[in-house]
Image: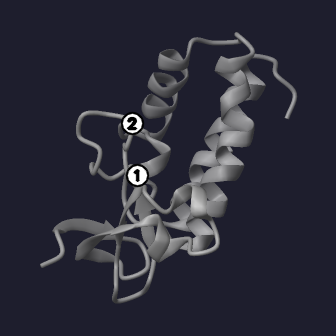
Amino acid sequence: MTEQRSIYCCGCESDVKASLVTGRDVYPHRSDLHSLPFWKCFACGNFVGCHHKTADRTRPLGVIPTPEIKYARRRIHQILDPLWKRGFMKRRVVYETLSRKLGFEYHTAELRSVDQARDVYRAVLDLRHSIGVAP
């Protein structure tokens, strides 16, 4: 039997019994990903990757996102990551500051809706503005 785990699925808007699959199942055209683990919701077809470079290589990277939420996460990282990568703030401080602004412990992989992603996007823009970094 396939290994299963309860994970929140953004497409189904609930905890689902996700199945552990390989990259061959979710990215059949990407042979470089075939051996990597992913958790897939078979009800909607969405999936999430795993912390495959750690001792717990099948631990999910977060909740199972929809394609729209994946896109929103990428956009957030485009404006968020330069803050710490270019040395404006330490990475830990960026995430702590966002967590205070948002009222919950922030991690991009835990975003559950496009509306929530929009709130985060605005908070990151506000943060950038407050430290004098152009959008």
Residue 121 location, x and y as percent? 65, 47
Q: Is residue 56 left or right of residue 43?
A: left
Q: Nearer the viewer, residue 42 or 7?
A: 42
Report the quarter where the N terminus lies: bottom left
Residue at numbered disc 1: 110
- At numbered mark 1, what does the secondary structure look like: helix, strand or loop? helix
Residue 99 appears left or right of 70: left
Question: What residue is shown with label 2?
Answer: 53
Q: Is residue 77 above or below residue 37?
A: above
Give the amino acid type for the residue marked by disc 1 in the picture: Glu
Q: Residue 62's spot in the image, x, y percent?
A: 37, 52
Give the camera-side residue of 48 and 54. Answer: 54
In front of the other: 74 or 18: 18
Which image quadrant is residue 48 in? bottom left
Residue depicted at 26% across the width and 73% down the height: 18
The residues tagged by marks 2 and 1 sit, at their Cα atoms, a distance apart of: 19 Å
Q: Residue furthest bottom?
A: 43
At x 77% / y 27%, what residue is drawn? 129
Residue 62 visible somewhere in the drawing: yes
